[in-house]
């Protein structure tokens, strides 16, 4: 290694040590604040409070201030030897200022000081190369050890750790990409419809893939430039439509918030500061807070009545796929069993007001930044005027305020215009609520509760027209009821026999040992009746208009059978115009190790399908499906 490269590495290592020390103090402060204010700050701000830690670790240079916490807790006071040998801040300060003659002279002088400090530490000058050649082999290692110095040895250990973790990260990413390529795009009409509906609800404009794979711990978002939502097929078959929507909402929230890019940033910081156990703890806590902030983002786009169902869905998924996504290229619906209780409590108590600007949360971030994102004031730093320090602090606060909530799309855009449009959209719901009269507010609440109660008691299906659609996530229609579930085949058959059109019956040629598990019938969410509801709702002039829908033909029917280990599912789904173009029987082209395996049958505007969690021949599936469909 050349002397110049070695010296540059030493200065970089000094900057890492100083930054890691300062961040450690900040991490302890954040943990204390989170503990003391655990019931007073919302999920989003518990996550954002980690922002100063990341900024502190990335700052190449920071202004000096008498307000700095490091005037009291300094690296020089705790480890003066390391501080003397690693004046990394001077090096980066000069890089920040520029590469003029004065800066270069200061850097050269720092290099000389570094060499002299090594001589003082070992008690002797470095061994010249010619003398080293004459050293006996038995003393070679010890001579080299003394020549390198303690700081250089620490730097070598640190660099070895960085390279090892970087290599592991590269290997993990290659495997992740291979697993993603081995997955299968989910393009069935039903799944595509749910996917695009949820994407629209969350306001995601980017192109996102929907992939099924058992090789990736899902549900998760993979990639940040070309994101893909990955869900295992074995999980898909256990989900109802609303449960799938809640999972997708969580994953779209990750995409909307650019969490994969944030995870990459945290992972890179962790690689550089791998020796700091407090930073490993901080990253783990930040990932946990990220999941809760993501839950809050998803819940903010839903109605309060959906909070409990969302929490139950999270619990259902985590019971089957509990754990954490450690890879930086993943952001997903994950948690350990310990975190479940805290997370479900937040979901239960969530209200949309809590997702707005928090004075307490913002105040904590600014307070932490003002004392930890500035360096200690050196004794010879009297030339720095108070005015400059105040201006730097103001600039820092402005940067936090301007950048923490807005994530701009990639490409050449008018950021000012984008910011204005975003603020306008965020104020729509609040403005719509303020515009309501007390009578309208009372009527909306009473009518919603009435319909909810009726649908629960009678099982009838209601469609609600919302005059002020901004109060309903921008949608003018919502649905209550119309979903019936059955635990016995007799109950299902009794209800199915009253329906028009084709239904599903229990096939006589089921594999041996398989018994009925459950069934589900859903009413239509498409058709001419929707136009009628809208027309009647507008004519009524009411802020919310409800109409009971007497449907005769099911839009979705699903039967499930199990032998206690594997599952066989048969479904019927109404096709849209695009899906109706494909006719007859066809099989999906998932790789052989991806399950469930589907066979589809498009006929008469409907899609019939059969899926299994084990490998069954297409011919056998076709015969069972033919037997199950009763026209």
Image: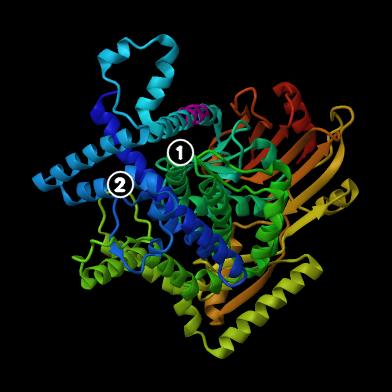
Q: Count how many numbered circles sit on residues in the image.
A: 2
Residue 234 circle label? none
Q: How would you rate the neighbour count of disc 2 (Cα within 10 Å): few for under 14, some for 14-19, many for 20 or more?
A: many
x and y percentages locating residue 479 in the rendered image: 64, 64
Q: Which residue is mark 1?
A: 271
Q: Quadrant of the N terminus?
A: top left
- Locate residue 571: give its quadrant: top right
Residue at the bottom extreme, as displayed: 438
- Viewer can see residue 86: no
Residue occupying the point 67% across, 54% down: 339
Q: Which residue is mark 2?
A: 87
Magenta portion: prevailing SS class: helix
- Viewer can see residue 469: yes
Q: Quadrant of the C terminus?
A: top right
Q: How would you rate the neighbour count of disc 1 (Cα within 10 Å): few for under 14, some for 14-19, many for 20 or more?
A: many
Position of 145 with respect to 131 (left or right) is: right
In the rendered image, the vertical position of residue 41 relative to residue 180, given as above or below: below
- Do the residues under discs 2 and 1 have CB atoms within 8 angstroms? no
Q: Which residues are magenta?
A: 167-175
Q: Nearer the viewer, residue 476 or 68?
A: 68
Position of 300 with respect to 244 (left or right) is: left
x and y percentages locating residue 495 in the rendered image: 83, 54
Residue occupying the point 41% across, 25% down: 145
Residue occupying the point 57% across, 86% down: 440
- Locate residue 17: give its quadrant: top left
Circle 2: element type: loop
């Amino acid at each position: 290694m050349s002397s110049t490269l070695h010296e540059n590495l030493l200065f970089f290592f000094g900057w890492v040590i100083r930054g890691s020390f300062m961040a450690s103090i900040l991490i302890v402060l954040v943990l204390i604040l989170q503990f003391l204010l655990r019931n007073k700050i919302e999920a989003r701000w518990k996550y954002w409070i980690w922002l100063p830690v990341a900024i502190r670790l990335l700052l190449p240079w920071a202004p000096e201030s008498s307000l700095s916490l490091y005037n009291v807790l300094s690296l020089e006071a705790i480890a003066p030897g390391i501080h003397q040998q690693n004046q990394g801040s001077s090096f980066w300060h000069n890089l920040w200022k520029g590469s003029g003659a004065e800066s270069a002279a200061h850097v050269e002088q720092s290099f000389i000081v570094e060499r002299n400090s090594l001589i003082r530490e070992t008690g002797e000058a470095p061994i010249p190369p010619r003398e080293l050649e004459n050293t006996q082999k038995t003393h070679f290692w010890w001579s080299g050890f003394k020549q390198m110095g303690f700081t250089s040895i620490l730097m070598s250990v640190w660099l070895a750790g960085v390279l090892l973790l970087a290599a592991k990260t590269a290997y993990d990413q290659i495997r992740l990409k291979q697993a993603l390529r081995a997955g299968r795009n989910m393009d069935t009409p039903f799944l595509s419809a749910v996917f695009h509906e949820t994407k629209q609800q969350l306001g995601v404009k980017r192109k996102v893939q929907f992939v099924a794979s058992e090789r990736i711990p899902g549900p998760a978002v993979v990639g940040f430039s070309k994101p893909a939502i990955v869900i295992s097929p074995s999980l898909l078959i256990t989900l109802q439509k609303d449960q799938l929507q809640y999972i997708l909402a969580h994953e779209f929230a990750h995409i909307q918030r650019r969490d994969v890019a944030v995870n990459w940033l945290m992972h890179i910081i962790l690689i550089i500061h791998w020796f700091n156990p407090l930073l490993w703890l901080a990253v783990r806590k930040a990932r946990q807070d990220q999941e809760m902030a993501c839950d809050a983002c998803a819940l903010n786009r839903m109605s309060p009545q959906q909070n409990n169902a969302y929490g139950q869905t999270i619990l259902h998924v985590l019971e089957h796929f509990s754990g954490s996504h450690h890879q930086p290229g993943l952001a997903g619906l994950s948690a350990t069993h310990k975190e479940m209780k805290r997370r479900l409590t937040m979901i239960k108590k969530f209200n949309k007001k809590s997702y707005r600007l928090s004075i307490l949360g913002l105040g904590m971030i600014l307070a932490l930044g003002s004392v930890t994102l500035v360096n200690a004031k050196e004794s010879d730093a009297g030339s720095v005027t108070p005015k400059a320090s105040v201006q730097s602090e103001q600039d820092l606060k402005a940067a936090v305020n301007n950048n923490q909530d807005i994530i701009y799309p990639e490409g050449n855009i008018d950021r000012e215009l984008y910011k204005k449009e975003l603020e306008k959209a965020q104020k729509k719901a609040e403005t719509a609520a303020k515009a309501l009269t007390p009578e309208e507010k009372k009527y909306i609440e009473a009518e919603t509760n009435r319909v909810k109660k009726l649908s629960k008691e009678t099982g009838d299906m209601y469609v609600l027209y919302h005059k002020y659609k901004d109060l309903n996530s921008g949608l003018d229609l919502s649905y209550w009821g119309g979903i019936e579930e059955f635990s016995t085949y007799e109950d299902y058959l009794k209800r199915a026999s009253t329906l028009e059109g084709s239904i599903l019956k229990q096939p006589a040629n089921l594999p041996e040992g398989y018994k009925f598990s459950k069934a589900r019938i859903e009413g239509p969410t498409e058709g001419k009746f929707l136009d009628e509801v809208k027309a009647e709702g507008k004519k009524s002039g009411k802020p919310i208009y409800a109409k009971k829908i007497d449907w005769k033909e099911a839009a979705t029917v699903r039967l499930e059978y199990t032998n206690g280990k594997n599952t066989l599912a048969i479904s019927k789904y109404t096709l849209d115009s695009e899906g109706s173009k494909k006719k007859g029987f066809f099989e999906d082209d998932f790789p052989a190790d991806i399950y469930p395996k589907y066979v589809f049958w498009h006929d008469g505007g409907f899609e019939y399908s059969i899926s299994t969690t084990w490998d069954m021949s297409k011919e056998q599936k076709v015969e069972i499906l033919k037997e199950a469909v009763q026209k």
